């Protein structure tokens, strides 16, 4: 039986991030993807033009439909958009302890356009983060969740932020250091008393749309396939490095184009 993962996130009309990017990632890694949509966005590679939030009761209805029929092996949470959505998702996940949850605290699009208001951010921090097996903030998101004035500028700062983020309640934290300088892109995974340093060569490309969504959904795919958390993160790190390396081949859009989710498959066709 094929493993099934669920993405709970916003729809990206340009197809590179959000629900669409997550489902592509699941498919590329051999996992069947289901989805619960929290928001509709009118966006492309240049920016977000409009956001329409899905009502909490309809989010609950989607969750009930999916979990009432499918054997979900892992959950990835992306764009939440509203406090109402956060509460609806948290209420359902409270009843599903044992299904691993990867939470990507999406606060802004690649273009910089905001995707999370203040009330939603507070609900995310109070109700969803404590339910997560792993949260995957980038440097800006980590600083914002902690109320820090500035993002971490080096690995020592990333370790400090990962440690403090654990105090918010998640079982593990992966602080993504892609915005730090250096020839290597370094992420710090911290769980229990363990710490893992994940590295890959830095890829020089402007086509980075969907990077965070793709990494977190790749981790969820690994967990759905019964990988350990560390192995799932290591494979996801390698997968996103390949997707970034091949991103310029796509030439999609006029702004920050998407990563290449099917970089391995398409080369075999």
Image (spheres, grey):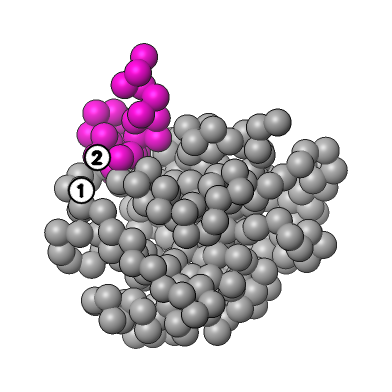
**Is 245 part of what is drawn in magenta?**
yes
Badge 1 is on which residue?
203
Q: Earlier in the sequence, mark 2 or mark 1?
A: 1
Residue stretch in magenta = 242-269
Residue in the picture at 27% in, 75% down: 155
Picture quarter with the N terminus: top right
Looking at the rendering, which quadrant does residue 247 occupy? top left
**Residue 249's spot in the image, x, y percent?**
24, 28
Report if the CB atoms under discs 2 and 1 are less than 8 Å apart.
yes
Q: Residues within 10 Å of mark 1 (few under 14, many from 20)?
A: some
Tally the numbered discs.
Answer: 2
**Image-based side of 255 in relation to 132, left or right:** left
In the rendered image, the residue lying farthest to the right is 68
Helix, strand or loop under label 2:
helix
* Residue 145 visible within the image: no
**Residue 186's spot in the image, x, y percent?**
28, 63
Residue in the picture at 57% in, 81% down: 168
Q: Report the Cα–Cα distance between label 2 and label 1.
A: 6 Å
Badge 2 is on which residue?
245
**Is 120 part of what is drawn in magenta?**
no
**Image-based side of 107 in relation to 260, left or right:** right
Helix, strand or loop under label 1:
loop
Picture quarter with the C terminus: top left
- Measured along the vertical axis of the image, is residue 156 above or below residue 34? below
**In this view of the protein, which residue sits in the foreground, 231 or 3?**
231
């Amino acid at each position: 039986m094929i493993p099934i993962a669920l993405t709970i996130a916003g729809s990206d009309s340009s197809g590179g991030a959000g629900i669409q990017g997550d489902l592509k990632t699941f498919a590329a890694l051999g996992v069947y993807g289901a989805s619960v949509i929290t928001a509709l966005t009118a966006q492309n590679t240049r920016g977000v033009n409009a956001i329409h939030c899905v009502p909490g009761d309809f989010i609950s209805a989607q969750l009930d439909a999916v979990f009432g029929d499918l054997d979900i092996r892992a959950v990835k949470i992306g764009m939440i958009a509203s406090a109402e959505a956060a509460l609806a998702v948290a209420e359902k996940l409270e009843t599903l302890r044992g299904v691993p949850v990867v939470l990507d605290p999406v606060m802004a699009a690649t273009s910089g356009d905001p995707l999370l208001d203040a009330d939603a951010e507070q609900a995310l921090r109070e109700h969803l983060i404590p339910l997560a097996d792993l949260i995957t903030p980038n440097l800006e998101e980590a600083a914002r969740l902690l109320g820090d004035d500035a993002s971490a500028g080096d690995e020592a700062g990333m370790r400090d932020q990962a440690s403090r983020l654990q105090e918010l309640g998640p079982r593990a934290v992966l602080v993504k250091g892609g915005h730090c300088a250096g020839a290597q892109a370094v992420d710090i995974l911290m769980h229990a008393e363990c710490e893992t340093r994940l590295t890959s060569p830095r890829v020089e490309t402007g086509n980075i749309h969907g990077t965070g969504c793709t990494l977190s959904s790749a981790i969820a795919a690994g967990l759905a396939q019964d990988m350990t958390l560390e192995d799932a993160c290591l494979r996801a790190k390698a997968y996103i490095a390949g997707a970034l390396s091949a991103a310029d081949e796509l030439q999609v859009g006029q702004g920050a184009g998407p990563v290449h989710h099917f970089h391995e498959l398409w080369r075999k066709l």
